[in-house]
Amino acid sequence: MLGLILRWGIVAAAGVVVIPIASLLINRRSSQQVNEVVVCRADELPLYAKRPFRFGTTLATLVHHRPGAYLAFASDCTHGKCTVLYRPQQQDLFCPCHDGIFDLQGRVVSGPPPLPLETFQVEVREGEIVVSRGINVKPWLTN
Ligand code: FES
């Protein structure tokens, strides 16, 4: 009986670690086919406003986090795929499911997420906000 419980415990523990990492890697691979997305016009996104968008198959969020500065990140938490939220007061990205916290560069600050969030380069071109996967990825841009 103890052996059975131990075996199922190992299987469950492996699932908790392997499934989130595998799904993140699969998701990143499928979104790599898209190089850039025009999300909206800059004048359509007031300060502290957010706009969900798709970068290939990746659900992402664009945030106007400081005057003239934008942030774009993959919205699915790397722990359990809950939607990550931008918190303007704390200037961080928060996952309400298990209190995961990321900084504005997508790095894990605290909580259970095993990997950082994917972030994107943001540019304003002729009044349009363009999100791309740049060579030197900067998650936000200050004009
Ligand atoms: S799903 Fe985000 S911290 Fe668990």
Image (tube, rainbow, N blue to C red):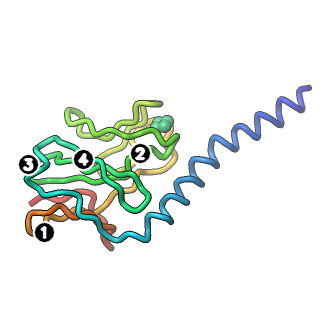
Q: Amino acid at mark 3?
A: Pro
Q: Which label lies toward us, 2 or 4?
A: 4
Nearer-N-terminus badge (2/4): 4
Q: Is mark 1 within 8 Å of ligand 1?
A: no
| C-alpha separation, residue under disc 2 versus residue under disc 4 | 22 Å
Q: Which residue does the image show at 64% across and 49% down from the upper left?
A: 18
| C-alpha separation, residue under disc 3 versus residue under disc 2 | 25 Å
On the image, the x and y values in percent for residue 19 come to 62, 48
Q: Amino acid at mark 2?
A: Val
Nearer-N-terminus badge (1/2): 2
Nearer-N-terminus badge (3/4): 4
| C-alpha separation, residue under disc 1 versus residue under disc 3 | 16 Å
Q: Which residue does the image show at 8% across and 69% down from the upper left?
A: 126
Q: Which residue is mark 3?
A: 67
Report the disc number at residue 125.
1
Q: Is residue 70 above or below residue 79?
A: below
Q: Amino acid at mark 4?
A: Arg
Q: Which residue is mark 4?
A: 51
Q: How many marks?
A: 4
Nearer-N-terminus badge (1/3): 3
| C-alpha separation, residue under disc 1 versus residue under disc 2 | 30 Å
Q: Which residue does the image show at 36% across and 60% down from the upper left?
A: 55
- Considering the image in quadrants, where does the N terminus appear? top right
Q: Which residue is mark 2?
A: 108
